Image (cartoon, rainbow, N blue to C red):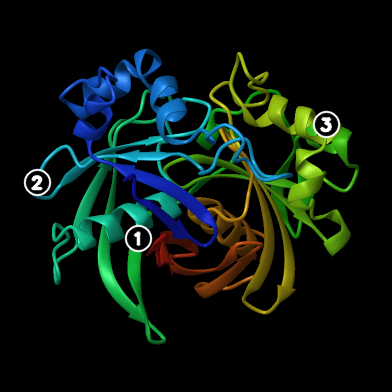
Amino acid sequence: MTPFYDARGNIYAVLAPDALRRQGIDLPQQADRAAQTREAWASAAIEAFCAWAPGTQPSGSKDHRCDGLLVGPFQSAPPFDLLIVNTDGTLAERSGNGLTIFSQALSDQGFFPNQEPCVLRVHHDKTDTPSPGETSVKNADVEGQQGFWLDLGKPTFGPDAVSAHGVESTPMNGRELSHVQPLSALNPAWTHSQFVRVGNPHCVTLVDVAEALPANQQMRETRLSEGLTRIAYAMPTGAGQPCPAGINLQWAMREAPGRIAARVFERGEGPTASSGTSATAVACAAWRVGWVSAGEVNVVMPGGTAPILLEEKDGELSRASLFGMARLMR
């Protein structure tokens, strides 16, 4: 039986490479080769493991029964290689909730080291950032909750960080942010955006009122869904504008000191209950405009709250870490 795990409302199937091969899917033996040939096998894997069985899809639910596949590990000792497969058949460079789930699956299988940090290496086929991307993960207990801290490294900001083209600058709180015209065309309140890379690319749009945060159901409605897909997805599914490789979209509102409300539309997936790297990007963008200080920041999404730890040195963010928990679904 395929194991499915839940982390803050994100659900992934975790599959050993041999599980795909037993389904007749021709997955290469090495993770790097598998990433480079994903067009030959990824869509078949999504269909085999993520599609609803005929007649079982609940009314109003997403097109797939999970948010994607975590394929790995490709070895029995760390560092561990894996692939993160979106439901559109593309590969993600990083997923905070996905890596949390993968860490829990490794722990359940007895592979995750108890005391030492564990390095996870995500292979992908994007050309604007190196593959594999590495994340150091360690066991942690936060307020009695057993989970994992993911070290997501030093964030970078601005259009160059995410290979964005054709965006205008706009000031906010003394910082130069970006005006993404396709976003503001969908909603005039979406005029101030901060590009952030935390291993994968993000566009965080900062808003002043809760009404400007799009609900997930709204983002599934035709006009808005089509508009956001054109922005977030690379061609041919989207337009790849302003980022040819696509971009994860978030909306953020300051809710209280150290607390940010957020919504997420993921590249390759669409509206999601939560996203770990998105939450991290939101916290970094909030720091950038002075909404929060370094230290712990809580990002509140429909699927749950993500604790983020921001570390500052010489007036710059030097590190962002994400805490997450995951559970095996029965």
Percent position (x, y) of residue 150? Answer: 35, 60
Q: Amino acid at mark 3?
A: Thr
Residue 222's disc number: 3
**Cα distance, mark 3 to mark 2?**
45 Å
State the residue in front, 138 or 201: 138
Which residue is painted at 77% across and 42% down in the image? 219
Q: Which numbered disc, 2 or 1, marks the residue that appears first in the sequence?
A: 2
Q: Residue furthest right?
A: 188
Is disc 3 surrounded by few (<14), some (14 to 19) or many (20+) residues within 10 Å? Answer: few
**Cα distance, mark 3 to mark 1?**
36 Å
In this view of the protein, can residue 29 be seen by the observer? yes
Q: Amino acid at mark 1?
A: Leu
Q: Which residue lies under the disc numbered 1? A: 150
Q: Is residue 188 left or right of residue 239?
A: right
Mark 2 against mark 1, which lies toward the viewer? Answer: 2
- Image height check: is 25 above or below 295? above
Percent position (x, y) of residue 314? Answer: 44, 65
- Image height check: is 26 above or below 114? above
Q: Which residue lies under the disc numbered 2? A: 76
State the residue in front, 24 or 247: 24
Q: Is residue 207 left or right of residue 273?
A: right
In this view of the protein, can residue 313 be seen by the observer? no
Percent position (x, y) of residue 298? Answer: 57, 72
Is disc 1 surrounded by few (<14), some (14 to 19) or many (20+) residues within 10 Å? Answer: many
- Quadrant that contains the C terminus: bottom left
